[in-house]
């Protein structure tokens, strides 16, 4: 099946003008499958960590959002233990005008601003609400342990 | 007709173009285990055999005409997948397909999208809940689409594109507005509709006469050695499979360009190539070969150029030899015939400088030119030729000036001589005149008649038997008398002049 022009263009642009702190490299044998790394944003519990993600563009992309999940363990109220992300633009708020680049930036922003009121990982969100400082400390510790650069 | 080495048994009817066969959706929150399955690439191109279509062999055997009329039905160009030569302005880029708009549509929020892109987008949204992909503004689906400014359509039509059949060999490039006309009417590489009724696929014009080729076949050679699903390939791709993929087709070792003789079935050859030093060297040698080919292709024009230069030099030399011989000695100056000039008087024309490399075919082998590249060499050659020519030109000018001086001097001397001579001549004439007039004065009264009588007598006596010397002296006397006559008899002198 031929790769749509848009995916080729996006990939070329991701390679030519990489976003700071984000990289996305397509697999050689499947250009719809990307290895993604995101650096934890500064001033956040994830600072200093490098998180691996996988990203897959479904057949009807860009009409449907890309499928993306964390491979690196991360302590975050909007990311469950399987790495799935609760982000509105990845679900109902998806728009075909969004791109891989913008989605990855949104995920990076989500790391900088966790939202325990719209949780995916209920236990984490619970802890986050009860004792935010302890939760942040746990997130730091997980980052040190699992998200080594 | 040789039968192809694969079975033509029609595979069981499968739905045409099975669309992304139910990819697992592991990330949906309902999925128990999240496992991304990236391996959707084997979303095979397997296409079922068209219903009721005879096999190509049957078509060829019976010569039955294709079900479609012979007129080609050309696939219209897909404007959305065109290849643009320049980067289009971002204002002309659709937010959905990231390419310049095709049939742009304007939304009330003043956002533009391709017509197709937008309808695809709307198809994923619930009715009555349509929104703009850019600003998410709510849209009324029943509202008529707004008019797109003509200047936008004009700018889109003016974008320069390549022919969509570039990969088939078309080199056409022009404005996007003309691409449809080109593909539908003029392009020789357009895909045409499959000639068999019931098949909706397209084939190249050269395959048109072969009937429908759009069904899967099985490679007999690798059957059983790998999974069935991998062996089924589209008839059209069979050759490619045999040439580059099939593990059971006989192939030669990569190193065969350097002499490796191994040729086995591809599986074994691949294993052999890992150890074959010649196969390891093959890419290097191939590169060298292409470079050699390039260099040889460049030598041709250079040789022609050198030939031209040599011929030019020869003609210059040829022109210069006679000119050179004129220089110098006076006898050369007077002799019109240059070939009579003794050859040792020609100064030897030194054609090349001492450093000037000879371009004889023998010399080239023994003494390679001391230059880095042929072009450098040619340039120096050209430069030295130019110097040579300008030097020759200067010498020519110089020798011309010298020759002029010589001629002038010689002329002056000769003129002096002539003046001298004419002076002397005048002197002599004056003396002769004086002597004559002295001698004639005594017989001035009767001289005329005596002279006439004398001349008569001499004329008559010429016929007589006198001695030759006496006759000669007599006639001499008569002539002097005749010459003496004119100054004295004016009528005679005028008569003589008219006679002359
Ligand atoms: Zn579009
Ligand atoms: Zn809008
Ligand atoms: Zn063309
Ligand atoms: Zn067909
Ligand atoms: Zn095969
Ligand atoms: Zn070999």
Image: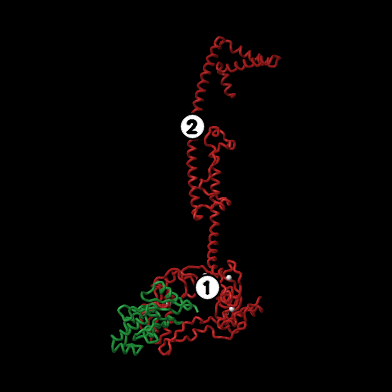
What residue is pinned by disc 2?
Answer: B408
Q: CA distance from mark 2 to mark 1?
A: 83 Å
Q: Residues within 10 Å of mark 1 (few under 14, many from 20)?
A: some
Q: Residue furthest top?
A: B442
Residue B477: horizontal and vertical position, in percent?
62, 15
**Residue A15 visible in the snapshot:** yes
Which quarter of the frame holds ligand 6? bottom right
What residue is pinned by disc 1?
Answer: B184
Badge 2: chain ID: B
Q: Viewed as shown, does residue B181 lie left or right of B1?
A: left
**Residue B195 visible in the snapshot:** no
Q: Quadrant of the C terminus of chain B?
A: top right
Q: Residue furthest right?
A: B465
In the image, the chain rendered in green is: A
Badge 1: chain ID: B
- Mark in the foreground, 2 or 1: 2
Seen from the viewer's position, the closer of residues B320 and A141 is A141
Residue B458: horizontal and vertical position, in percent?
65, 15
Q: Is residue A116 above or below residue B255?
A: below
Seen from the viewer's position, the closer of residues B96 and B263 is B263
Q: Residues within 10 Å of mark 2 (few under 14, many from 20)?
A: few
Residue A28: horizontal and vertical position, in percent?
47, 76
Asked if the beta carbon under badge 2 is closer than 8 A to the nearest atom of ligand 3, the reply is: no
Q: Viewed as shown, does residue A106 lie left or right of B358?
A: left
Q: Say if mark 2 contacts mark 1, CB within 8 Å.
A: no
* Nearer-N-terminus badge (2/1): 1
Return the mark for residue A22: none
Asked if the beta carbon under badge 1 is closer than 8 A to the nearest atom of ligand 3, the reply is: no
Colour of chain B in the rendered structure image: red
- Same chain assignment for discs 2 and 1: yes
């Amino acid at each position: 099946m031929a790769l749509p022009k848009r995916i080729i263009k996006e990939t070329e642009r991701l390679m030519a003008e990489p976003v700071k702190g984000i990289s996305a490299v397509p697999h050689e044998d499947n250009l719809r499958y990307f290895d993604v790394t995101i650096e934890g944003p500064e001033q956040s519990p994830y600072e200093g960590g490098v998180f691996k993600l996988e990203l897959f563009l479904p057949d009807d992309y860009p009409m449907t959002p890309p499928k993306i999940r964390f491979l690196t363990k991360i302590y975050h109220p909007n990311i469950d233990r399987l790495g799935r992300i609760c982000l509105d633009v990845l679900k109902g708020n998806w728009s075909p005008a969004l791109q891989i680049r913008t989605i990855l930036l949104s995920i990076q922003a989500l790391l900088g601003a966790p939202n325990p009121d719209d949780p995916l990982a209920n236990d984490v969100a619970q802890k986050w609400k009860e004792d935010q400082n302890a939760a942040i400390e746990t997130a730091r510790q997980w980052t040190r342990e699992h998200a080594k650069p | 007709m040789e039968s192809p080495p694969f079975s033509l048994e029609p595979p069981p009817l499968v739905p045409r173009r099975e669309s992304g066969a139910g990819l697992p959706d592991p990330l949906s929150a309902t999925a128990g285990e999240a496992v991304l399955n990236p391996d959707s690439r084997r979303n095979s191109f397997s296409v079922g055999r068209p219903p009721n279509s005879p096999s190509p062999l049957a078509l060829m055997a019976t010569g039955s005409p294709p079900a479609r009329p012979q007129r080609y039905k050309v696939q219209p160009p897909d404007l959305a997948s065109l290849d643009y030569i320049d980067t289009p302005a971002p204002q002309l880029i659709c937010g959905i397909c990231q390419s310049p708009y095709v049939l742009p549509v304007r939304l009330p929020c003043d956002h533009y999208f391709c017509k197709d892109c937008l309808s695809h987008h709307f198809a994923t949204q619930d009715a009555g809940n349509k929104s703009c992909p850019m600003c998410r503004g709510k849209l009324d689906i029943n509202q008529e689409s707004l008019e797109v400014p003509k200047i936008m359509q004009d700018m889109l039509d003016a974008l320069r594109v390549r022919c969509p059949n570039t990969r088939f060999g078309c080199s056409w490039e022009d404005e996007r507005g003309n691409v449809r006309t080109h593909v539908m009417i003029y392009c020789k590489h357009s895909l045409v509709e499959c000639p068999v009724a019931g098949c909706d696929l397209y084939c190249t014009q050269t395959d048109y006469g072969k009937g429908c080729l759009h069904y899967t076949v099985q490679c007999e050679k690798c059957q059983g050695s790998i999974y069935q699903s991998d062996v089924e390939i589209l008839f059209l791709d069979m050759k490619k499979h045999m040439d580059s993929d099939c593990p059971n087709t006989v192939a030669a070792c990569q190193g065969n360009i350097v002499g490796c003789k191994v040729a086995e079935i591809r599986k074994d050859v691949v294993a052999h190539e890992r150890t074959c030093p010649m196969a390891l060297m093959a890419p290097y040698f191939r590169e060298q070969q292409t470079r050699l080919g390039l260099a040889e292709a460049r030598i041709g024009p250079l040789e022609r150029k050198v030939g031209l230069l040599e011929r030019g030099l020869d003609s210059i030399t040829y022109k210069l030899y006679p000119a050179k011989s004129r220089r110098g000695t006076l006898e050369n100056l007077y002799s019109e015939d240059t070939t009579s000039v003794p050859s040792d008087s020609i100064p030897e024309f030194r054609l090349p400088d001492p450093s000037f490399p000879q371009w004889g075919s023998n010399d080239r082998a023994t003494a390679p030119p001391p230059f880095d590249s042929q072009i450098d060499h040619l340039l120096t050659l050209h430069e030295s030729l130019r110097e040579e020519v300008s030097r020759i030109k200067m010498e020519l000018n110089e020798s011309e000036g010298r020759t002029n001086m010589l001629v002038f001097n010689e002329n002056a001397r000769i003129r002096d001589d002539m003046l001298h001579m004419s002076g002397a001549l005048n002197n002599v004439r004056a003396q002769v005149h004086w002597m004559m007039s002295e001698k004639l004065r005594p017989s001035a009264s009767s001289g005329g008649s005596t002279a006439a009588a004398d001349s008569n007598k001499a004329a008559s006596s010429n016929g007589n038997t006198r001695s030759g010397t006496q006759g000669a002296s007599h006639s001499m006397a008569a002539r002097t008398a005749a010459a003496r006559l004119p100054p004295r008899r004016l009528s005679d002198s005028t008569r003589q002049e008219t006679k002359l």
